[in-house]
Image (cartoon, helix red, strand yellow):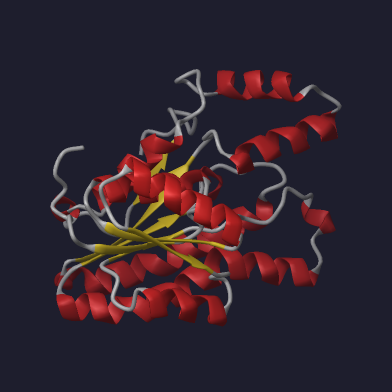
């Protein structure tokens, strides 16, 4: 990878024992960043830490914690008190028809995909401003722009986060602190495959058939590779990306049809 000017920086990457979070952690580690990965499953996290340390030349540490809770956030910040980079990421609510969402589920979804990222940003942003460098990237979803049936709660919560940080990003830009969003389309992750299976079951179709049809919907005619998103994340965290803030980068192979 081209030198991104962030070797030696410290990064917290939430939800990074697998999927898109892990891809972001790997790309940052390859850029020489010291990475603290996070997940709720200690065994999976230990395996991911060992594999990432083997595949990169950077230092990898891990914190098993649920960052949607205050206790989990404190544990993460105790391990890495002064991060230069924060990647917020959390699995969204399960695929479910909006009619089946009760009040508890609604608040839980908001907590995962809007409230927790905001709380983490609150905890780290002043230190970034004081040190005159910071990069925050929120992994949201294409569903913020393009509704996906069954992901209504996830879409709403992530749209709320996007709107919330739009003003915050402008407030801290003078200190070389940026906040941006990555909006992934279809990427080959466990969550994507779970969604394929859930839709296939609801429509009485074979998962392989649904997967083929889904790929054909994308102008690129394929599903994205997680490392493609990881490298985009690393770029937004780079020294030379300091003039990009308050933006949402759509990575979807052309799926969302828009000129702007």
Image quadrant containing the N terminus:
top left
Q: Position of residue 214 (x, y in %)?
A: 62, 25
Give 41 or 243, whichever is nearer the viewer. 41
Give 41 or 150, whichever is nearer the viewer. 41
Image quadrant containing the C terminus:
top left
Q: Position of residue 93 (x, y in %)?
A: 68, 56
Asked where in the image residue 65 lies, by quadrant, the reply is bottom right
Q: Residue at x 18, y 81 (%)?
A: 130
Q: Position of residue 64 (x, y in %)?
A: 53, 67
- Residue placed furthest toward the right: 204
Q: Residue at x 36, y 44 (%)?
A: 54
Give 206 or 180, whichever is nearer the viewer. 206
Considering only vertical position in the picture, is 253 above or below 24?
A: above
Considering only vertical position in the picture, is 92 above or below 230?
A: below
Q: Position of residue 112 (x, y in %)?
A: 59, 66
Q: Is residue 124 left or right of residue 73?
A: left
For residue 21, say whether it is visible: no
Give 83 or 245, whichever is nearer the viewer. 83
For residue 132, say whether it is visible: yes
Q: Is residue 12 left or right of residue 108?
A: left
Considering only vertical position in the picture, is 18 above or below 256?
A: below
Q: Residue at x 30, y 57 (%)?
A: 59
Total marks in image: 0
Q: Is residue 242 left or right of residue 90?
A: left
């Amino acid at each position: 990878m081209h030198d991104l000017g962030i070797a030696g920086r410290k990064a917290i990457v939430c939800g990074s024992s697998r999927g898109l979070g892990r891809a972001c952690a790997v790309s940052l580690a390859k850029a020489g960043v010291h990475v603290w990965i996070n997940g709720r499953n200690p065994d999976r996290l230990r395996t991911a830490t060992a594999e990432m340390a083997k595949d990169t030349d950077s230092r990898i540490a891990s914190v098993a914690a649920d960052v949607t809770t205050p206790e989990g956030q404190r544990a993460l910040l105790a391990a890495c008190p002064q991060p230069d980079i924060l990647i917020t990421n959390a699995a969204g609510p399960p695929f479910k028809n909006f009619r089946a969402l009760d009040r508890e589920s609604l608040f839980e979804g908001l907590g995962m995909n809007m409230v927790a990222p905001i709380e983490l940003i609150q905890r780290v942003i002043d230190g970034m401003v004081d040190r005159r460098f910071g990069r925050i990237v929120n992994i949201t979803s294409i569903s913020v722009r393009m509704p996906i049936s069954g992901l209504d709660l996830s879409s709403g919560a992530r749209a709320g986060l996007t709107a919330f940080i739009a003003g915050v990003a402008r407030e801290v830009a003078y200190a070389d602190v940026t906040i941006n969003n990555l909006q992934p389309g279809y990427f080959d992750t466990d969550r994507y495959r779970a969604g394929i299976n859930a839709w296939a079951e609801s429509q009485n179709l074979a998962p392989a058939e649904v997967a083929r049809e889904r790929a054909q919907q994308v102008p690129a005619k394929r599903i994205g590779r997680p490392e493609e998103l990881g490298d985009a994340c690393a770029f937004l965290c780079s020294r030379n990306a300091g003039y990009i803030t308050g933006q949402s980068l759509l990575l979807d192979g052309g799926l969302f049809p828009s000129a702007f």
